[in-house]
Image: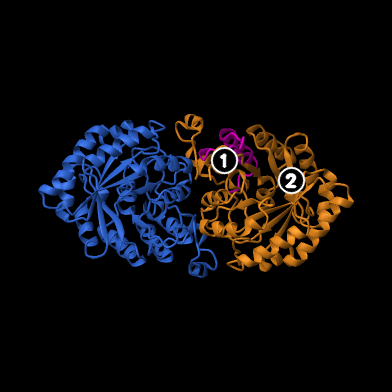
Chain colours: A blue, B orange
Amino acid sequence: MALRGDNVTVQEVGLRDGLQSIAAVMPTSEKKRWIDKEYAAGVRHMEVASFVPARLLPQLADAAEVVAHALTYPDLTVTALVPNLKGAEKALECGVHRIVAPISVSIAHSLANVRKTPHDMIEEFGRISDLRFSAGKQKCTLIAGLSTVFGCTLRGEVPLADVRDIILRVIDAGADLVALADTTGHATPGQVDEFLTALRPLDETKISIAHFHDTRGMALANTLMALKNGIREFDASLAGLGGCPHAPGATGNVATEDLVFMLDSLGFRTGIDVELLLDTRAVLQDNLPQAALYGSLARSGLPKGYATMQLQTERVMA
Amino acid sequence: MALRGDNVTVQEVGLRDGLQSIAAVMPTSEKKRWIDKEYAAGVRHMEVASFVPARLLPQLADAAEVVAHALTYPDLTVTALVPNLKGAEKALECGVHRIVAPISVSIAHSLANVRKTPHDMIEEFGRISDLRFSAGKQKCTLIAGLSTVFGCTLRGEVPLADVRDIILRVIDAGADLVALADTTGHATPGQVDEFLTALRPLDETKISIAHFHDTRGMALANTLMALKNGIREFDASLAGLGGCPHAPGATGNVATEDLVFMLDSLGFRTGIDVELLLDTRAVLQDNLPQAALYGSLARSGLPKGYATMQLQTERVMA
């Protein structure tokens, strides 16, 4: 499997997954600045908001305005999270390109997170899918964001058979794409390889997105295993911002800058400039002084000679 | 390439690589406790000391006594670092099983570290090799510890051709094994793959050890690439202790406990119990209260259901 030159999509999810788990509310103007700077760095996929009631997540109450700003960039793919049909209505009204609806594989996590079972969530997912057509928004891509795929802080291990079952159901319910999320940082490279080897053949076109958290430092190694299994889209959060309010001990997503740096080293094309990404951390430092910011690259700096390394293109993973 | 069930050697180098870069001097009795606890955890390879003048590294002045203690375990492979012939004489007298002599690929790092060129160091390496025979210690394994293989904080990128040249010279000079060290945390997975693909065919039996630092969070991903290329021995340091006094900004080795956790997940047999390793960190906390201790696993804990995961053996990396 020669991977040289493959394009890889890195979606910034810090504006949603990062900010939702931090108490401080970032001003709308600063969210726009964040989008502007990441766009300038070359990021072309962002999950910028969540359409949830403002009383639940005041940090994301400006979803419509943030989406509207993101949509001013004609080549930026704008994604929003929706927890239910009502949120989907709003997201479709705003004209997002992609909707991601989360469904926990773990019943315990699902009940803690949304007070519904995975089965209930899949039924709602089907209604969201239907809504696209009745609203004349069939071009909007619907993503099933499967959470706790690789384990759960409440339940522990999640059986592969459960994941397989839910994947088949969400595809049947209308999912265009399926994202596999390690919400709680349980995944290990061996497990990622095992799961993806078993699951991707169910539908290689649709099962195409991975979302890793770096709770146990495995996110980049897990990414390598996902690449090996053909995954070419990854979620990440600038400075590893985030976590999950209903998954105790789960630290943030893999840091976008570290992920892009590694993908560069492997010869994958992301279109993203790591140095400009690192500069973008200033938005977080300015607005979230209490938040834990992660990222090995920010701590250590780019290696001496990084520009030269970038010119080497003979990178092959066989 | 099915890796299931392969044995992988993890060598603890914190007693040498970790302690040498920390100003505090750990009492000899506590070093023995560290050895005892890691042995109890299943570690069977340790680099326990460096035979350097006590005025240069007072932290390691008790090398002979520490080695003697380690040698009381009949199935523990005891390695010591020696910077020169004089150090090698002492190490051989103490009866270590393996000697590792460091040679920087980067001239700038070599001069800063030992005030000698790589060429001078290779000549000394040859004298060390000869000494084994004249001293009747030909059973002692001689390891060429090549440092700054993947880059250098002083020089930047290190050309692959330079590494190849030095590997051939040290093998010619008598090296039984060659360890490739990312002394300054420059290595990226793409580079590790590229370098090992090019270098291992020079002598697959001898070029068999990797030593990664986690400066930019790439150590575990680099390890995956080394595994893919057939490397089956890795250095690591408990709690990621260490760095390099002559490589500014280089943080510590990959944490032993994180490395073992990942290897477990891939189905490799290390013989090491991660929970007992985590307990061993107490020795560092007790004795080095000022030192930075790293390790994602220690921060986040083992995942719920870890014992169950261990029972799954169907892990394959193809």
Q: Does the magenta stretch include residue A173?
A: no
Question: Percent x, y for residue B260?
Answer: 57, 40
> What amino acid does circle 1 point to?
Val
Q: Does the magenta stretch include residue B278?
A: yes
Task: Kindly state the secondary structure of the residue where label 1 is placed.
Answer: helix
Going 33% across and 36% down the picture, which residue do you hit?
Answer: A164
Given residues B197 and A87, the one toward you in this image is: B197
Same-chain check, marks 2 and 1: yes
Q: Does A317 sit left or right of B82 as displayed?
A: left
> What amino acid does circle 2 point to?
Thr
Give the numbered dot on residue B260. Answer: 1
Given residues A315 and B235, the one toward you in this image is: A315
Label 2 Cα neighbours within 10 Å, binned few <14 / some 14-19 / many ≥20: many
Numbered disc 2: what chain? B
Given residues B7 and B50, the one toward you in this image is: B7
Instruction: Name which quarter of the figure residue B48 lies in.
Output: top right
Instruction: Name which quarter of the figure residue A116 lies in.
Output: top left
Q: Does B275 sit left or right of A88 as displayed?
A: right
What is the CA distance from the residue labelled 2 to the residue labelled 1? 20 Å
Asked whether residue B290 is in view, the answer is yes
N-term-proximal mark, 2 vs 1? 2
Give the numbered dot on residue B21. Answer: none
- The number of discs equals 2
Question: Percent x, y for residue B64?
Answer: 80, 44
Asked whether residue B244 is in view, the answer is no
Question: Percent x, y for residue B19?
Answer: 67, 48
Range of residues picked out in magenta: B264-292
Give the numbered dot on residue B79. Answer: 2
Q: Does A164 sit left or right of B306 as displayed?
A: left
Given residues B232 and A55, the one toward you in this image is: B232
